[in-house]
């Protein structure tokens, strides 16, 4: 539903689609959260990787719709998950210059850009919001 | 996990903090596809640590920084 709506669905919306109570949906989300398959903020979805429920510096346009990604990796991940070309808009964290990248047939149109990951992989889930 | 214009911009942004790992955006694109291409499949299940480590390895990300556990 996240991909279709362009935003995180509520537990009530998912429950209605699945003929389940919202509390049942929330309990399922909690199990997915504990398995690192979802990130909750209270009882609401914060991250359903690669999609973000809140605005971020990574905006992705693809297939006629738009989403926020959690990070640069997830921005490309949204195109991959949808299996379509797309467009990523962000800014360089150093100089705030706009970085605008088209993804066509699984390749970025600007190969000069660099990706930096600050936190080692083994520590990503210590604080998944800061990686 | 950010995109930068160049190595110079990364170094300036770090402002003396220890650097993490830097890879070309082309490698990131390959990695993202391998990691997330199945995310919306109806029968999707979270990848195991071993599956994800194999994806990192296949993208050439084999040093200790990229070890998941």
Image (cartoon, rainbow, N blue to C red):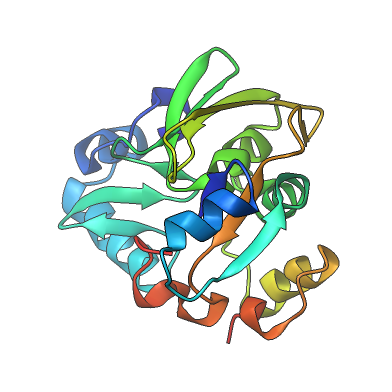
| Residue B62, image x, y percentages | 77, 77
Q: Tell me the residue at 27%/45% (across/down).
A: A20
Q: Is residue A93 left or right of residue A63?
A: left
Q: Is residue A19 left or right of residue A123?
A: left
Nearer to me, B11 or B62: B11
| Residue A80, image x, y percentages | 67, 39
Q: Tell me the residue at 55%/12% (across/down).
A: A64
Q: Is residue A52 visible?
A: yes
Query: On the image, which quarter does residue A15 sit in?
Result: top left
Q: Tell me the residue at 34%/30% (across/down).
A: A7
Task: Check the image and name the residue furthest to the top.
Answer: A64
Q: Tell me the residue at 71%/32% (across/down).
A: A83
Nearer to me, A119 or A35: A119
Q: Is residue A96 above or below residue A42?
A: above
Q: Is residue B58 above or below residue A104?
A: below
Q: Is residue A39 above or below residue A51?
A: below
Q: Is residue B44 visible?
A: no
Q: Quadrant of the C terminus of chain A?
A: bottom left
Q: Quadrant of the N terminus of chain A?
A: top left
| Residue A63, image x, y percentages | 60, 17
| Residue A87, image x, y percentages | 60, 23
């Amino acid at each position: 539903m996240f991909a279709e709506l362009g935003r995180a669905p509520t537990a009530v919306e998912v429950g209605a689609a699945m003929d389940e109570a919202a509390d049942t949906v929330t309990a399922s989300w909690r199990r997915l959260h504990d398995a690192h398959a979802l990130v909750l903020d209270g009882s609401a979805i914060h991250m359903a990787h690669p999609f973000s429920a809140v605005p971020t510096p990574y905006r992705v346009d693809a297939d006629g719709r738009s989403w926020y990604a959690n990070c640069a990796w997830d921005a490309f991940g949204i195109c991959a998950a949808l299996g379509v070309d797309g467009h990523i808009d962000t800014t360089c964290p150093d100089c705030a210059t706009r970085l605008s990248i088209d993804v066509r047939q699984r390749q970025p149109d600007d190969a000069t850009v660099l990706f930096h990951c600050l936190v080692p992989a083994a520590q990503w889930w210590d604080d998944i919001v800061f990686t | 996990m950010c995109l930068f214009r160049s190595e110079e911009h990364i170094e300036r942004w770090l402002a003396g903090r220890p650097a993490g790992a830097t890879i070309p955006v082309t490698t990131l694109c390959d990695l993202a596809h391998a990691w997330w291409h199945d995310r919306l499949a109806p029968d999707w299940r979270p990848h195991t640590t071993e599956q994800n480590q194999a994806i990192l390895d296949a993208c050439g990300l084999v040093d200790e920084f990229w070890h998941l556990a």
